Image (cartoon, helix red, strand yellow):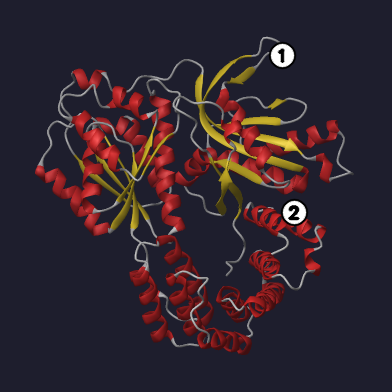
Amino acid sequence: MAHPGIVSAVTGHARSGALSYAWRLFHGAALDTVQDDPAVLSLRGRLLKDSARAAAGPEQQRLYREAGDTYARAGALDGSTYPLINAATLAFLAGDREAARTRATDVLTRAEDPQETPYYQAATRAEALLLLGRTDEAQVALAEAMARAPRAWEDHASTLRQFALILEEMGEDAGWLERLRPPRSLHFAGHMALAAESEALDRRIRAVLEQERVGFGFGALAAGADIVIAEALLEHGAELHLVLPAAPKAFRRASVEGFEGDWAKRFEAVIARAETVRSTREAADRPNALDIELAAEAAMGAAVMHARMLTSEAVQLLVLDDAGEAEVSGLIRAIWAQGGRRQHVLAAPRQARGRGEAASVQPAPRGAVLAALLAIVPERRVRPDADSGAALLARLVDLVAAGPAPLLPPLWSGEQLTLAFACPAEAAAAALRIVGALGEGARVGGHYAVVETGEDPFRGGSLLLGEAARRPASAAASAPPGAVHLTQDFAEALSASATNGLHLEYVGDLPSAAVGPAPGGAQAIGLFSLRASPSAAGA
């Protein structure tokens, strides 16, 4: 391949949701004249497919047809089945059943593609059979594919989305896909200092895991309900993903060691077996109420995003008592319910106040807030006719005023506008409203964090202080013009509540230099593009 660098760049911008900018790069590099490079042709097919997903009616069908033809040319050059099966499905979506049948038959006559994994070798055959209307055979072939790679959940999910789209276009029932879906994701939480562990509570927890066919768990690891549920998840054979409000050692000191019993030993045993361990605030020496709320929202969103990625479902398991309703666990329950998702709430009594209770949760320091931060950076280089600075600022003022009021007064530095909202959904709406109005005239970055506020001694008003306040600008710097990039914490908190009409896609990590130093080494910070969901689903 003679164009690896530009192909990678264009693909990255397309994944970020900056489709028009990706097309601009594609045309600017004269890739539309390239007819002998399968990778370039497949990229053009992908851009056309993405354009079709955002279109409707005859225009959508035209774009699907052109995308399919482009993939077909790529497949003819290197003989691989990936572009060929894409070409077949896109022809089907374009309404060209004859071309779809011809291409699907061509796929079936070829030997298994050695460039593909064993899973996709069988899944490609299953998709071709489905396009030919041989649904019973497609079911058998798809079951064989999944047997070849029983834990390749993301691959399974990609195929199931494709099959659901084809079956919908056929007008056929897709119910048989349900039994093939990956296991559910579970968010778990509960109060600390259980009065006494009981076999009855253990049985109820295990029953929920069995009933819901849970394969993945997301939560913290405090003494009490967290550890009990985490142990049950591991015994059940599920993957455990821990999201802590502080570095593990600091979290253990604050939320485990202060409770009587063998919780510390059990904490170490569980954390050693966890699939992943992430801290939302590495620098926190002792997590406070806001730190815990941030980690809880991130864990809830992580479960939701994981389930969405796997075309599965996220459910919640809480262990509460009456007092828990007024604490963080009650807030967690309300946020999950707001998203319309299913919950299991188990009642378990709390021990009398004592050493453990005194060590539980401390209040946030004065001036600290949990905020969804945005950095809007005008990108005047791509618009020679851009507004003057004063006119641009006036437009930004109007765009901000069109939605809910920010948590703090907006701050204009001369190069970027910084906004802070109490709610991630409000910040996300503002971000999309701004890029929708300014197009490629702005880049937007977002971060959700506990930040310190202070008085500006020079201009008056409030200031955002600390390293977390600089993260939105780093996220914005990574975004192509006209796109919104959110950090992982923001994307997860946004997903914890309802996200209808929004689309989030992982696009990479912030460079370590942008993340900054952290005790024990900086964690990579994932970045996600945010855009409105396309008006029509695509291949």
Q: Is residue 116 visible?
A: yes
Rendered image: mark on residue 459: 1
Q: Residue at x 78, y 40 (%)?
A: 379
The picture places residue 494, in percent across and down from the top left corner, at 50, 43
Rendered image: mark on residue 21: 2
Q: Most extreme residue toward the top, as rendered?
A: 457
Q: Which residue is drawn at 52% across and 53% down?
A: 500
- Looking at the rendered structure, the secondary structure element under dot 1 is loop
Could you tell me which quadrant the C terminus lies in? bottom right
Image quadrant of residue 43?
A: bottom right
> What distance separates the C-alpha of mark 1 from that of mark 2?
38 Å
The picture places residue 18, in percent across and down from the top left corner, at 69, 53
Q: Which of disc 2 and disc 1 is earlier in sequence?
A: 2
Left or right: where does residue 76 sit relative to residue 245?
right
- Say if 314 sits above or below 407 in the image: below
Q: Which residue is drawn at 67% across and 67% down?
A: 39
The picture places residue 71, in percent across and down from the top left corner, at 65, 74
Marks 1 and 2: which is nearer the front? 2
Left or right: where does residue 422 sit relative to residue 31?
left
Look at label 2 and name its amino acid.
Tyr
